[in-house]
Image (cartoon, grey):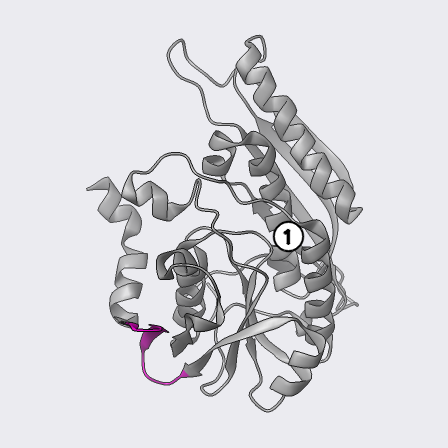
């Protein structure tokens, strides 16, 4: 648990007694993406691992994989496997980060059903000083919230579509050049001590990401979504497009951050325990305590 109550994007460990140099470790996969599009689903898993490692101020170093699929003797299942492997290669090769280990588990099916393609990715990053690790939890009222990366109309496989019962749609793509540029500039800002907290955006999109940051700091946020252009409000909130981070920036150093990082200023941290969202004529106010209650009881409510 990080901060008041939330989780991190990657675990940070200090393996050497006499050195503060450490490792960041993350594991990622989204079977809903892979079910609709094995290629982009697998590519998204690798790219999310990269973003999670960067979120804690580590430089991505290497990957391992655990590839879980159905019966490869069936053309459809073998096709899913080939597409997923090509997606893994595309992102790893684009970032020049190697897969150093892995395993494959086939025949995960019964006579009547099979699992969705599930390429689980383990990512390892190097952090030069674990004392400088960045966490998810919001730190101080008055600090500014920035969105790095582009939100797109990519709702296929999203939690939003799942809850609405919508199948299909465009699965998020990966844009290596864009993500690489943003990754390098974000790491530079972290190195200069400008970034106070950071969270990558994945399941649930922007609204879930900002709630998790707010839970950790037990602080509220005012969001202005008009800075995100050409999208409906629900897509701005729930799109799971790749290549994005939410960043809390020291309010006294925002100009320095904006010189380094291409990002949109979309909010400010506040003391009041609520998430307030504005997008043109749309206005939404959500109680942090009520949101936390729903977040904590999600499994229990599903079981009931």
Q: Position of residue 129 (x, y in %)?
A: 74, 70
Q: Position of residue 159 (x, y in %)?
A: 38, 46
- The residue under the point 41% across, 13% down is 110
Left or right? Give the position of 304 relative to 241: left
Dot 1: few (<14), some (14–19), or many (≥20) neighbours within 10 Å? many
Left or right? Give the position of 258 relative to 230: right
Say whether residue 215 is magenta. Answer: no
**Rendered position, 153 above or below 219:** above
| Residue of label 1 | 25
Determine the image quadrant of residue 102.
top right
**Rendered position, 223 above or below 125:** below
**Rendered position, 221 above or below 186:** below
Secondary structure under badge 1?
strand
Q: Residue furthest bottom?
A: 252
> Magenta span covers which residues?
270-282
Q: Position of residue 140 (x, y in %)?
A: 48, 84
- Which of the pair 74/59 is nearer the observer? 74
Q: Position of residue 101 (x, y in %)?
A: 73, 34
- The residue under the point 65% across, 79% down is 258
């Amino acid at each position: 648990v990080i901060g008041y109550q939330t989780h991190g994007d990657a675990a940070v460990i200090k393996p050497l007694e006499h050195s503060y140099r450490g490792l960041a470790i993350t594991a990622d996969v989204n079977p809903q993406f892979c079910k609709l599009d094995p290629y982009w689903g697998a590519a998204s898993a690798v790219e999310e691992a990269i973003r999670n490692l960067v979120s804690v101020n580590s430089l991505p170093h290497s990957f391992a994989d655990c590839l879980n699929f159905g019966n490869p003797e069936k053309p459809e299942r073998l096709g899913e496997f080939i597409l997923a492997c090509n997606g893994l290669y595309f992102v790893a090769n684009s970032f020049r980060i190697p897969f150093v280990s892995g395993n494959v588990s086939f025949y995960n099916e019964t006579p009547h059903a099979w699992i969705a393609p599930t390429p689980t990715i383990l990512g390892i990053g190097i952090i030069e000083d674990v004392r400088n690790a960045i966490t998810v939890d919001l730190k101080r009222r008055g600090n500014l919230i920035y969105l790095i990366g582009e939100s797109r109309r990519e709702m296929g496989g999203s939690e939003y579509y799942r809850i609405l019962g919508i199948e299909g749609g465009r699965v998020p793509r990966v844009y290596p050049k864009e993500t690489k540029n943003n990754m390098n500039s974000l790491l530079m800002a972290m190195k200069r001590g400008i970034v106070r907290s950071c969270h990558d955006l994945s399941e649930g999109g922007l609204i879930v990401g900002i709630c998790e940051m707010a839970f950790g700091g037990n602080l509220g946020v005012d969001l202005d979504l008009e800075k995100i252009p050409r999208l409906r409000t629900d897509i701005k909130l729930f799109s799971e497009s790749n290549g994005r981070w939410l960043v809390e920036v020291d309010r006294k150093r925002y100009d320095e951050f904006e010189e380094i990082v291409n990002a949109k200023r979309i909010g400010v941290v506040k003391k009041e325990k609520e998430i307030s969202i504005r997008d043109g004529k749309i206005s939404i106010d959500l109680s942090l305590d009520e949101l936390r209650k729903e977040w904590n009881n999600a499994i229990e409510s599903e079981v009931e």
